[in-house]
Image (spheres, coloured by chain):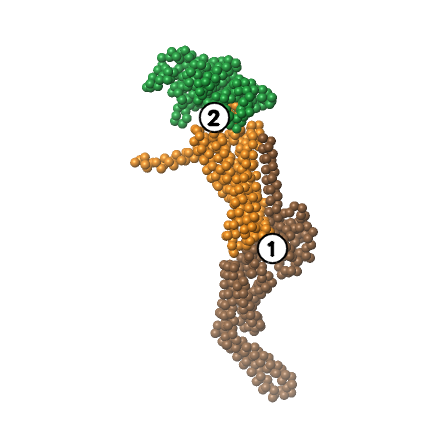
Amino acid sequence: MQRTLTAPLAWVGRSATDVAASFGRFGSFSLRVARGGRDLGTWGGLLATQMARLGVQSLPIALFVAAFTGIVLALQASYTFTGAVPLYFVGVLVQKTMILELGPVLTGLALAGRVGANIAAEIGTMKVTEQVDALETLAYDPFAYLAVPRIVAGIIMFPVVVVFADAIGVLGGWITAVSLLDLSTPEFVRGLQLFFKPFDVQFSLIKAASFGLTVTSVGCFFGFGTTGGAEAVGRSTTEAVVAGSMAILVLDAFWAAALLR
Amino acid sequence: MKRRQEVLVGATILGALLLGIGGTLWLKGKHLGTQESQISARFREIGLLAPGNPVKMRGVPIGKVESVELEPNGDAVLVTMSVKEGLHFPRDPVVLVAPKSMFGDWQAEVFPRSAFPQYDYLESPDRHVLPGFTLPDMSRLTVVADQIARNLAVLTDRFGIAFTEETAMNIREAIDNIQEVSSKLTTLVSTQQKTLETVGGNLEQTSRSLGAAASVAERAFAQIDTSVGHGELKNMIGDMRRSAARLDSISAVLVASTRQMKATMGVADTAFRAVAAVAGSVQRGQGTLGQLVRDTVLYSQLVDTNAQLQALIRDIKLNPKRYINVKVF
Amino acid sequence: MSIEIRDLRKAFGPKIVLSGVSLEVRDGETLAVIGSSGVGKSVLLKTIVGLLTPDAGTVVVDGREVRTLGREELYELRRRVGYVFQFAALFDSMTVFDNVAMGLRRMRLPPEQVADRVEEALDRVELLGYGDRLPAELSGGQRKRVGLARAVAFRPKYLLYDEPTTGLDPVTTTVIDTLIRKMSSDLGVTSVVITHDMTSAYRVAGRIAMLFEGRIRFIGTPDEIRAAADPVVRGFVEGRPDLMQGVA
């Protein structure tokens, strides 16, 4: 009887402790990564490879997502605006939505799946097969060797990918507007330029860089946290994707609140 | 392998840089290679004008608003604009700031002062800074119209109070008194005529003049008498009330609906014409009515309101697009 | 100078793995640590190179306590201690050559010298000419030998083997055991071999220590362990769980 009554309390207590412990672990993980960051000699040479893997190889998926997002935005905008708002506002909506929100966020989510999962699986596998320990015995700091180049590559390459995604999204909207809607190129471009501020691009890039930091850090964190066997690697991978995606959405709201007011 | 990756990454980053910078410049509306020069204008306030808004001349875009700054003492706003170089501005140019559409996008347009001399442009001690004026937007216009409607409503009420039965009686009594005085004068003159025959010539002339004056006065008062008697004034007051009510409803319509703008324009036109007619007829009876009513406050308010209305009507007629029939779509 | 372990304790959460292990590894000897799976043999080995931090007790290598070492000092220590992992723990994405060269590159040796020492290490494990292969293209025994080559490329003073023969066929096991002895004699290294394979232990070790329930139950030469009267030791050595039951 007493057990049934105290069970919810115990659950709350345990959850709170777990959350606190996770933050604590992430904190010490961050510290070790920061310390590893000073070891430029170790990670500097690995950066290009990671930039190619996380960035360049992510371009196809990011551009695919962006192109279709642009198309859908243009169609939905024209559907919503019918009769009430001038059609060139399709351009406004495509530009604003793509650059401010969907470009970075959808790219971030797509890469949370691709990059975050990849990192967690790779480091997780290395952890359970003792390759991380092997690095240690060879006098390498695994955080400097594995985490730092991935995180730095993420911070640099996410904005790069997002620039392309923004451009392709707008282009997709443009082609749709001209070919499927009764909109001419000058009208669409007028809409594009109407409320554009250079800050929109900065905002997009700031978000992208923070997403890059988050997705790669979370991937590394869960990768290094893997203990056990192949099943544990699978679990870490899933957790990395879920946590990365959630972090992106929370960060997205944070940046909107911090910079768009 | 590693070198290939480095080249690939380098090319991607470079591509993103070019795309980012080029795209930003293009979306900003800057075209590389076009020369631009800066102009400034000074305003009391600038509505919702913001950097990036278009600058036009004769309706053609010629540049963008670059910056909007409050002057250090807070009395004026300095707007800096970049425009295509080598443009010839009209003589004595001024800058008018106005809403471009209903969606909060504003614009600045360069005009010769002679195009709209009626506005109170804010002059600048600096010769290179153009004088500027900001037109009110829709919401402000409705606020003004609402104010006028309220004034009219107050006026008509006071008209109603002033022209009670008692007032009419008093007016009639006064007219009777004047008639009596003038007839007494005539009698006096005719009795004196017999005894003072020698001075007759001059006096006779004087008395005729007096008689004429009396009859003129009589006619004038009779006019008022009939006005009061036949209810013309009541009609006038009624007209005023209706006009005020219509103006009130216009304000409501303006705030509530932008789609029926054209219909509203028609209603407004009729309403303003009716108000103008009423105000005009009151103004024509200026001397007698003004004195008789002896309510100078009421009178001056009526004149003020009339002037306000006239100005509003003139503005609306002059710039129907900008004021009432704002081209929404 | 050698490795001295005193009263070492380590627990993972509620599970106590080591509860007061004391052990001395003498200079130049090959010590085998035997015990059932999951008894904490790997944990013991990992605390020696600082991969795991003990809850209590000390590990002294060459006169310095591992736990008190700074990061750079620890790396310096690890260059003196080669570690051969249970499943070799080769870096999957790298060739055999790069795997062996990893530690050497870290020491910032010139490329020619790295190449020479990789050749030398591969030669020692009889895998010359395998440098361009990827780990996935190797058999289990070959992978272990690459792992060994990687550990000896530093020319270490100590070699720690974590289950070097687990999962290998008897022939390959013999090959690995021979290599372990060869390393010991050629390089003069002090070795600690963790195993649960008694044949291997007898073959490579000068002394054998048995870990049981978090402590060293027995330590002695192969002959001594064969003659041991302790039922736990006898049970393990002879592979008779019935003897070990009910004894603590």
Question: Where residue A258 sits in the image (x, y, percent)?
Answer: 52, 43
* Residue on which the image places disc 2: A130
Position of the C terminus of chain C by quadrant: top left
Chain A's colour is: orange
> Taking A253 as reference, is B40 above or below it?
below
Q: Which of B298 and C74 is in front in this view?
A: C74
* Residue drawn at 42 percent across, 16 percent down: C199
Q: Is residue C21 visible?
A: no
Chain B: colour as depicted: brown
Compare residues A140 and A182 and report the one nearer the observer: A182
Chain C pictured colour: green
Q: What element carries label 1?
A: strand
Circle 1 residue:
B97
The reply to whether residue B62 is visible in this rendering is: yes
Kind of residue at badge 1: Val
- The residue under the point 56% across, 58% down is B327
Q: Which residue does the image show at 46% across and 19% down from the upper left?
A: C172
